[in-house]
Image: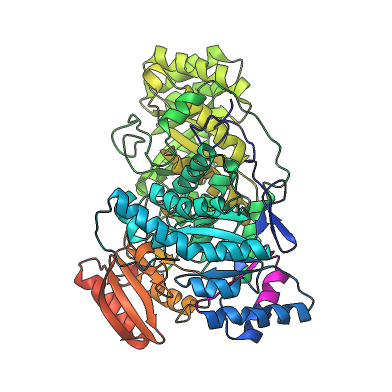
Amino acid sequence: MQNTGQWYAPNPFGYRRRPTRAVKVGEEWIGGDHPILVQSMCTTDTLDTAATVEQSLRMVAAGCRLVRITAQTPKHAANLKAIREGLWARGCRVPLVADIHFMPEAAMVAALHVEKVRINPGNFADVKRFAVKDYGDAEYADELERIRERFTPLVQRCKELKRAMRIGTNHGSLSDRIMNRFGDSPRGMVESALEFLRIARSLDYHEIVLSMKSSNPKVMVQAYRSLVEAMDREGMDYPLHLGVTEAGDGEDGRVKSMAGIATLLEDGLGDTLRVSLTEEPENEMPVGYRIARRYSGRVESPGHEDGAADWIAAHPTDAYRRRETAVIRAEGLGLGGGRPVRVWTRLPFAASAGLENLGWLRGYRRGPNEGLVRPEILFADVSTQKDVEGFRLFAEGAKTLKAASAARVRVGDASVISGLGADWICLEAEPGKGGQLAGAVAAVGRSGAGLLVELPDSSWEATRPLLGEVLDACARAGLKPALAIRGGNAGDSLRLYRALVASLAGGFVDAPVVLWLKTDETAEEAALSASTLFGAGLLDGVGDALALEAGSKVDAIGLAYTVLQSTGARISRTEFISCPSCGRTLFDLQEVTAAIKRRTGHLVGVKIAIMGCIVNGPGEMADADFGYVGGAPGMINLYVGKECVVRGIPMAEAETRLVELIKGAGRWTQPLEQV
């Protein structure tokens, strides 16, 4: 199926990297047939030449191919020359990127000394005041002409000096003009970039890379997809820089970044990436390469056309919508119908140790201040009558944890179903066993358990007829199943899930879906696989439960909850938005973030933003409950929503004052140790 501009990728069920023009940055290339380039940004003071050179060298040693440095004034921009000379003197010719906000004059100076200039269209020619104003067409046209006058000199200089440019939209810093015309939306982000892009094209300048960053992966994914649609309509082929901004630190920051970035890469979108962590910049490189490696030399698969139009119609690029599903097991821990996305976990058991294997779960939690996160449905394999007694103990143990029990049974072993007393039966369907399948489904119906049918991770050509057999058997038994594909390759499984959802019809169109991943990978690779399959599925609005089978060194329960938290699908602890630091940051971001997490990490459902400066602060915090923002050296501004309620607090007092704000708003609860 050819892309007709209706969607952002050629086919939802296949893989093909989006063709883009190649943009040269120094001796590096972005786009075209070139590998995905991994880059990062310095956190040092740009006026401290020695510190910036040393940090850049550490970043390059870790694999960074492009080093970005903030240039907040013409003076800072001028010092980029000394930094470049310092790197060259050390034998390092890594291309440099100047990061510009608010000051076109700084961009003009920076272009003399670096290979690429990044401008933010939200503040290049505007100052954000959150003003409400009705722009008529004539007034809006006047605004665009003002932008043209401010932007044209930089375009001409970059064209003359053969410098590249990134037009980098940030969700948190859209101009008042865009906010009033298009709203705080993915479309507004796209239009913000297009205003500047059209000016550059009119001047015959094309060495451009585009980005659409947000701290919210849902917004980020929608904005990039919408941008590609818009570029296709106007015949543009510029490469994309991917990233989730203000992702945070630790596993949360990594999973949030991986979910957003991998979702787009799975659809063939993206030519360079940055993982934005509130850590030392060299720590971003291993995560970035872990993501990029999976798409190096990726084999194209055209996909099939059956159901593609239905999928596209149900998944507009600029809006998130969770798939509506029926309820399976309305009582207790059921699936679907808008219920929370459940967490399934596989536990081994033996007839003599059915309870002991569950004991450690009774007090399971990820950290001292993070609250309890337990699996809600525990499943174990059952294949013989000898397993039945052990499973009964297993099921009793699950009840003590307020969890449901699930038995995973092959259709050929259906004789064990009647004596299990399980809350759920997971039937492993196999091709060529239609008669046994019908008997097994009927046995589940008689048992009163909820039914999950597991399809094999195979080609769609093999899966589709088996799905037909499953739905026929369920129709005869009068049962509506939940459906899963027990996959090991996250990308292939994602496309199978899309095909599965698009192919459901009749009385089963709203069948719940369990996203299931089985992996023996290391903890780091398992996190990427889970972020890819679970993250992309959830960001598509698909997934009523997550089932993760992983090795003993992988915290499968915690990882599943982290993916849910990172995608906004289910909140189980405090949500932190923290920027990765740069030369503009007015305090030690890593130290402050860690301290605030220690004080507030137990506040389930509270969203706290920690911003080093004002650039993206108020905007990126728009949906945060509370904000802690650097206002001046040693001074902090505190926000409730996007309203600054306290200005200029000495840092020594700011953390306590933030807690007082949270308490005053009635959002404080005591940590578990104090309850």
View extreme (right): residue: 91
Above or below, 236 against 175 in this view is: above
76 inside magenta stretch = no
Query: If the image is split into quadrants, where does the C terminus sit?
Result: bottom left
Closer-to-camera residue (307/141): 141
In this rendering, the answer to whether 608 lies above or below 586 is above
Report the magenta residues as a range: 56-73
Q: Nearer the viewer, residue 45 or 355?
A: 45
In front: 208, or 149?
149
Q: Quadrant of the N terminus?
A: top right
Does 71 appear in magenta? yes
Q: Is residue 366 visible?
A: no
> Where does residue 28 sit, x and y in percent of width and height?
72, 60
The relative height of residue 500 versus residue 656 in the rendered view (above or below) is above
Residue at 38% x, 23% y: name it. Answer: 480
Q: Nearer the viewer, residue 340 or 540?
A: 540
Image point 34% across, 44% down: which residue? 340
**Where in the figure is residue 65, as x and y percent of width and height?**
69, 64
Left or right of 338, for residue 467: right
Viewer can see residue 499: yes
Q: Tell me which corner region of the image, top left, top right, bottom left or bottom right, holds residue 586.
A: bottom left
Q: Please give the name of the residue rendered at 54% of the width and 32% of the height, measured from the top-left corner.
A: 12
Task: Give the colour scheme of this rendering.
Answer: rainbow
- Residue 535, placed above or below residue 133: above
Q: Position of residue 618 (x, y in %)?
A: 34, 67
Which x, y percent locates residue 344?
46, 43
Total marks shown come to: 0
